Amino acid sequence: MVILGVLASGSGTNLQSIIDAIESKKLSARINVVISDNPGAYALERAKRHGLKTEVVTKDEYPEKEAFDGKLVSILKENGVGLVILAGFMRLLSPLFVRAFPMKIMNIHPSLLPSFTGLDVQKKALDYGVKFSGCTVHFVDEGVDTGPIIIQAVLPVAANDTPETLKKRILGEEHRIYPQAIQLYSEGRLTVKGRRVTVKDGGGQEGTLENPPVCIFKDE
Ligand code: GAR
C-alpha cells in the first residue's frame, strides 16, 4: 500500500475524491499528511473531518523558496510519504523538492497537456476555440506541467460553455482519473521510460489505457 502526502491550496475536491476512494476500498493507499500553504484552505477542513493529520506551511513563515520547499520535504519524509499528491497546490516546486521525490510526485492539471499550462486554463482553452478539453494526471519533473503523462480524460467543449461550466465538468473527470492513477501506482503497474508511462495489465503485460472510458475499477 502506498503512503500518500497530499498538498492542496484550495477547496480540495480532488483530495476528497482520493479520501472517498480510499474509504470505499477502491484505492489501496493511506494519507499520512495533508499540507497546505493556505491556512484558510477548505482542503484542511476536509482532511480534519476524516481524521487526517494536517500541516500548514506559509510563504510568510518561509519567504525563501528553498526553505519553504525544504520544510515541505522534511514534513513529507517525517511522515513516511512514498508518493506526493499535488491536488490543486498552487505553488511551483523547486528542483530541490522534485529531486527529493524523483517520479514520486503526481499532479492533476485541468487541460489536455501539453496544451494550456499554468493558470486559468479553462478560459485559455475556450479562447483558443478547442473542441475538446479535459484533464491530465502526470508525474512531476522540474518543468511547469511538463512531466510524463499517466492518464488523460477528454471532454467535448459545448458551444455555450463558460470557463466555469467547463471547469466543473473537467473537475468531474479529475475526480475519476486521479484515484485511478494512484491505484495504478500503488499496484506497481506504472513504468516510466523517458516521457512515456506504460501501464501493466493484470498479467504483467504492458497495455494501453483506452479512452473513453478510462476505467480500472470493476464497478465503473
Ligand atoms: C483542479 O481543477 C486542479 O486540476 C487544478 O486546481 C483545481 C483544484 O481543485 N490544478 C491546477 O491548476 C494545477 N496547475 P480542488 O482544490 O477542488 O481539488
Image (cartoon, helix red, strand yellow):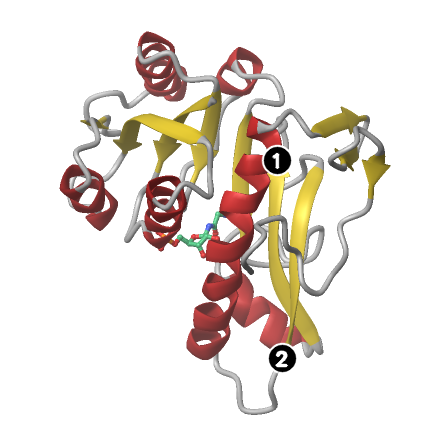
For image coordinates 71% across by 51% down, the residue present is: 114
> What percent of the width, then of the height, locates residue 110?
54, 57
Q: Give the labeled residue for mark 2.
A: 157
User: Do we see residue 144 in this rendering?
Assistant: no
Total marks drawn?
A: 2
Look at label 2 and name its amino acid.
Val
* Label 1: which secondary element: helix
**Foreground residue among 211 and 23:** 23
Q: Quadrant of the C terminus?
A: bottom right
Give residue 172's mark: none
In this rendering, is residue 99 above or below 111? above
Q: Residues within 10 Å of mark 1 (few under 14, many from 20)?
A: some
Please identify the quarter of the rendering in which residue 7 is found: top left
Counting from the top left corner in percent of width and height, residue 79 is at: 31, 13
Instruction: From the image, tell me which residue sits under label 1.
Output: 184
Q: Is residue 139 in view from this perspective?
A: yes
Q: Residue at x 41, y 17 (%)?
A: 81
Residue beneath the point at 28% across and 53% down: 11
